[in-house]
Amino acid sequence: MDQRELKILLAKANLSKKEFAQMIGISQQSVNNWGSNKNIPYWVKSYLLNYIELKKYKAIREKIEELGILTLD
């Protein structure tokens, strides 16, 4: 993963670098350093891809519950 792909995935996740850093419990500066003078950790891509998918499923669930089709709790 490179900086460009990180930027794309963060945009798809609707997250800023600051928000992502807060989410995973590290400094924003650490995230800013990824790809320039530090390698991006191997797990970041799968983490963001899973986060993006989870957001899709949550949106579907909310819509289903809004329509009163099914209560999923």
Image: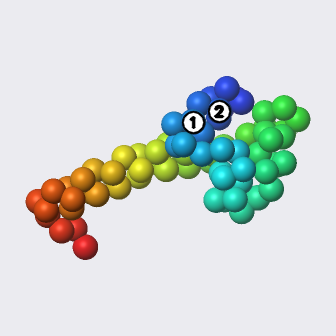
Find the distance from the CA under tag 1 to the CA under tag 2.
Answer: 6 Å
Q: Residue at x 84, y 48 (%)?
A: 29
Q: Looking at this view, name the residue that lies furthest to the top.
A: 4
Q: Amino acid at mark 2?
A: Lys
Left-right relation of 29 to 50: right
Q: Position of residue 47 (x, y in %)?
A: 56, 49
Between 67 and 12, the one lying in front of the other is 67
Q: Amino acid at mark 1?
A: Ala
> To which residue does mark 1 refer?
11
Do residues under tags 1 and 2 come within 8 Å of each other at their CB atoms?
yes
Q: Residues within 10 Å of mark 1 (few under 14, many from 20)?
A: few
Whether residue 20 can be seen here:
yes
> To which residue does mark 2 refer?
7
Left-right relation of 54 to 19: left
Whether residue 41 can be seen here:
no
Q: Residues within 10 Å of mark 2 (few under 14, many from 20)?
A: some
Q: Looking at this view, name the residue that lies furthest to the right.
A: 37
Q: Position of residue 35 (x, y in %)?
A: 78, 33
Q: Looking at this view, name the residue that lies furthest to the bottom.
A: 73
Quarter occupied by residue 64: bottom left
Q: Residue at x 36, y 46 (%)?
A: 56
Quarter occupied by residue 42: top right
Q: Position of residue 37 (x, y in %)?
A: 88, 35
Quadrant occupied by the N terminus: top right
